[in-house]
Image: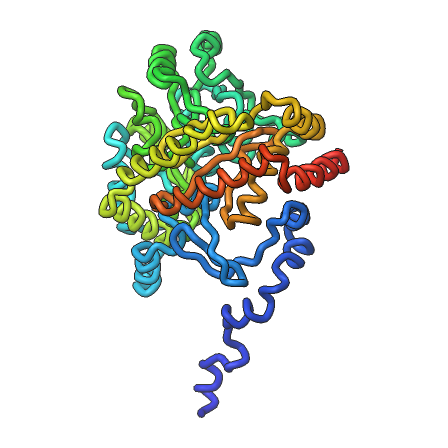
Amino acid sequence: MTTAESASEPSQAGKFDLAALLAERGAERYELHNRYLNPQLPRMLHTIGFDKVYERAEGAHFWDAEGNDHLDMLAGFGVMGLGRHHPVVRKALHDVLDLSLADLTRFDCQPLPGLLAERLLVHSPHLDRVFFGNSGTEAVEGALKFARYATGRPRVLYCDHAFHGLTTGALSVNGESGFRDGFAPLLPDTAVPLGDLDALERELRRGDVAALIVEPIQGKGVHEAPPGYLRAAQDLLHRHKALLIADEVQTGLGRTGDFYAYQHEEGVEPDLVCVAKALSGGYVPVGATLGKDWIFRKVFSSMDRVLVHSASFGANAQAMAAGLAVLSVMENEQIVAHVRGVGDLLRTRLAALTDRYELLADVRGRGLMIGIEFGRPRSLKLRSRWAMLQAARKGLFAQMVVVPLLQRHRILTQVSGDHLEVIKLIPPLIVDEGDVDRFVDAFTAVMDDAHEGGLIWDFGRTLVKQAVANR
C-alpha cells in the first residue's frame, strides 16, 4: 500500500463499529444512565422492577435478554404507531440514505417536504400549509407563535389537565401543575375546564385571546371532549376572532379510529393542527404544524420574514422519508379501519369486566386510546386496603396493576398520569385479536389476584413505604 493510500483510508483500528460497541458496553446501560443522564430514571425502574434488558423488537412485541416475548401496549408513548421496525419505513430510510441527497442546504427547495405536506393535507382538506419541526412540543410552539402573530393577541387558552409539551411555551399551556412548578415565569395563558363553554366565553369577552388549544381526547386520564364541545368552541372562538388549535400529537394519525380525533365531531375544522409521534415511524423525530393559508401568509408576510420561524433539522430528508412511508402504510394497510375494529373489541371486552370487579370503575376512550380507571371498592376488606394506598399516595393501585402486568405477564403499560388511578393503553396501531386476548387474559388474572388479596398487595406495601420515604 502506498503512502497516499494509507493516508486516505482509515485504519481498521479507527473504524467505528456500533455493534461491537454495544456488545462491549451494552451491559452498562443502567450504570451509564445513572452516571451521565437523569439519575432518577434508573432509580425508578429498579424500584418497580422495570429494570429489564431488552435486546430486539418487531411490530407490537419486543424480547428481553432471556428471549422472552413482551407485548407492547405503550408504543413508546405513541411514537411506535406502526410498531417497531416496520419493513416499509425501514426500507424508505435505507433508500434515502443510499441516495446521498443534498439535504439541508437551507437555500434550495427539496422535493420530500413538499411531497409529505401534500400527503398530510389530503387528510386535512380544510388546511393549506405545513411547517415541519422535530417534535410534538415544537409543533405546539409553532402553533402558539402563529396564532399570536396572526391575531395580534397575546393570550392562549388551554384546558385543565392538558399536556402539550415541556418547552417553555408549551409548558405555559400545560394543565398539570407538577410539570410547571419551579419553571415560572411562563407565558400569560389561562386554563379553562374541558367542556365548559361558559368559562371559554368569559375569557373570550376580554378581547385578548388568540386561540384555544385543546386535545380532542386528553392523554392525562383519557378524557374526551364532551359531544358537541369542539364545534361549539370553534364557533365561539371565531365569533370573537380567535383560533382553534387541535393538538393531535398523540391522538392523530389513526390513533382514535379516524385520521384525526377531531374528525369524530361533524363540522370541526381547526385553524391549526399539531401532529408528531407516529409520523416518525418510530425512527426519526418529526413534528408538523398544519394551518390555513391566511395564517401562514401573515406570519411569512415578506422576504424579510422568510426565516422568522424555522428549525435547523426541520424537514430533513430522513424524517420526510419516514413520514411518507408511514402515510403510505396507513393507506395501503387500511390502518384507520383496523384501529376502529380492534379498538372496539378491546374496549368492549374490558368494559364487560366492570360488573365483575368492584375495583374497576370505568373503561373509556376511542380506537386504540383507552383509559382503565380504578375506584373505591364496596367490600370492607378491599376498602381498608384501598384507603391505605390512597393515604400514602393517590395512583399507587394503578401502579400495582401495571407492575404485575409486566413482571408476570410480560405486557408493558403505563399509569396515565401522576396521582391518577388510571392505566392508559396506547398500543401500536397494528395489534391484532391475539394481542387483545393476551392483554385481557393477563388483566383478568391481575384483577382476580387483587380481589382475592394475593401477591399484588404485598407489592402495594412496598410502594407505600417508597411513597412515604419520598415525602
- Residue 294 seen in render: yes
Q: Residue furthest front?
A: 452
Residue 471: x %, y % from top left: 75, 33
User: Which residue sits at x=45%, y=19%?
Assistant: 153
Position above or below: 190 against 132: above
The N terminus - image quarter: bottom left
Which is more toward the observer, 382 or 367?
A: 382
Q: Position of residue 94 (x, y in %)?
A: 34, 62
**Residue at 30% of width from left, 33% of height from top?**
258
Query: Can I make out residue 145 in this image?
Result: no
Q: Return the residue found at the far bottom.
A: 1
Q: How is the image coloured?
A: rainbow
Closer-to-camera residue (152/454): 454
Q: Nearer the viewer, residue 455 or 111?
A: 455
What x and y, as percent, mark residue 28?
A: 63, 63
- Total numbered badges shown on the rendered structure: 0
Q: Residue at x 41, y 25 (%)?
A: 147
Most foreground residue, 160 or 126: 160
Q: Position of residue 193 (x, y in %)?
A: 50, 16
- Location of residue 426 with respect to 91 vertically, above or below: above
Direction from residue 82 to residue 454 in the image, left or right: right
